[in-house]
Amino acid sequence: MSKRTLFSFFPVPRAGRDVVTGLALLVSLGGCTVGPSYHPPQSLLPPTWSELPESGVTTQSVQLVEWWTTLNDPVLDSLITQAVSANLDLRVAQGRVRETRAQRGVTAADAWPTVSTSAAYFRTRQSENVGPFPSSSLGNGQSSSNSQFGLVEGDLFRAGFDASWELDLFGRVRRSVEAAEADIAAAEENRRDVLVTLLAEVARNYVELRGFQQQLKVAYANIATQQTAVEVTQARFQAGLTSALDVAQAEAQLATTQAQVPTLETGARQAIHRLGVLLGQEPGALIAQLSEDKPIPMASLEVSVGLPSELLRRRPDVRRAERELAAATARIGVATADLFPRFTLAGNTIGLQSASLSDLALGSSRFWTAGPTVSWPLFDAGKIRANIEVQNAREEQALAQYEKTVLTSLEEVENALTAYAREQTRQRALTNAVNANRQSVALANERYVKGLSDFLNVLTAQQSLYTAEDQLTQSERTVVSNLIALYKAVGGGWEISAQRQ
């Protein structure tokens, strides 16, 4: 029913209409929004990275939407696709976004009138001990003849509309909506941050798994070599060419290397269990799929990370902190609005009332009540101003948290850059060490068999080779893990959330 039809059926006196019209005009012309207006903070960022290596990393601006594909591992690609679809932390973050969107609707509804309709029927009987009841206020006015006080019974039918509307003259609702919208943006950035962390965790645990598998491969190869050494020493001992000491030393070396296997197997299984949980499955769900050993994914030779200034738009945690600051600023306005009076159109009722159902639709059955109310706290023991101070303090905390988040993001990138570059240098040195140790083992075995040196040289060479090969495998794994940390530090990967929703 339109406003015109409503007023024509339920005519409100001109004075009542003037009140409504005047207050509506006050809202449109005289309303204001109290509290500080938000302005994004300005951060002073370095022009470039201090730990930028001479080669391998560039500051070119690139899209890092699916950075893990640069590792060229189809199994990893499949695991990440499953994780994005089923990870429980991501589902929690998505639920938080839906919650904040719904909460924004609850807050925004305060800017609109609330209208309700009701209908009622009453059957009334007057007590015999309180005297006559005015017939005009009680229905049909029929009295019982056997009551000395004029016992009255009657019907009352009633139907109508009730409305109330708080006029947002000082922006309390508008600031609340502003804060709610900032909360939505912060929740969305939190979901993106969870996604960035998830992508990095899946990739890191997958690389850990392949690293353990390669370490096992190295251990088994060395066990085979050392088993051969045990057999050689036993044969030479039986031939009287060497002592039992050589046999004991060879067996001890073999047992020491064999002792490394359970620890490496435990690490591999734990990585598989962790990947299962990250994919929203039971820990053992991926054992059959991932138990076969595969090589460690190869890291890219060149990585583009952009400039420090790009972190403010790339890192979801920085963007979330900025939106939380915006929400805290808006809530100062919400608290400040409580200092000013509230104007409400409350208790406004238009309806029909009659003692007879057949007369309910007649014009004479119409009734109405209308009028504004004003409330203005004169004394609250400083509660409102204390709440303003609370919101100001929270805004200061949000600003400090934003600045800390920016600095932390810079630190993480710098640390990832230096770790990635230094580990590559270490990997090259370990590669040289492995090659040299293999030569050393071959020469030591040859001299021992010819009787030109004792078995201690063989043991030392074998132990040095195993240590170097194991460290090289760990370094290859660490290089890729550091690359993953670098991609995470620059905020890579969150864009896929928009593509796959």
Image (tube, rainbow, N blue to C red):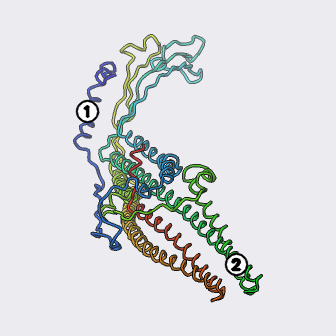
The percent coordinates of residue 52 (x first, y second) are 34, 71
Residue at which label 2 appears:
232
Where, quadrant-wise, is the C terminus in this rendering? Answer: top left
Residue at which label 1 appears:
21
Rendering quarter of residue 298: bottom left
Which residue is painted at 61% across and 79% down in the image?
463
Crowd rating for badge 1 (residues with CA inside 10 Å; few <14, some 14–19, many 20+): few
Q: Secondary structure at mark 2?
A: helix
Rendering quarter of residue 306: bottom left
Earlier sequence position, callout 2 versus callout 1: 1
Q: CA distance from mark 2 to mark 1?
A: 107 Å
Where, quadrant-wise, is the N terminus in this rendering? Answer: top left
- Callout 2, which amino acid? Val
| Discs 2/1, front | 2
Could one spot residue 244 in this view of the protein?
yes
Could one spot residue 385 in this view of the protein?
no
Of residues 6 and 464, the one nearer the viewer is 464
The percent coordinates of residue 362 (x first, y second) are 38, 13
**Relative height, residue 425 to residue 318 (above, below):** below
Of residues 340 and 40, the one nearer the viewer is 40
**Relative height, residue 335 to residue 60 (above, below):** above
Say which mark, if any, is on residue 474: none
The percent coordinates of residue 245 (x first, y second) are 73, 86
Q: Residue furthest toward the left?
A: 29
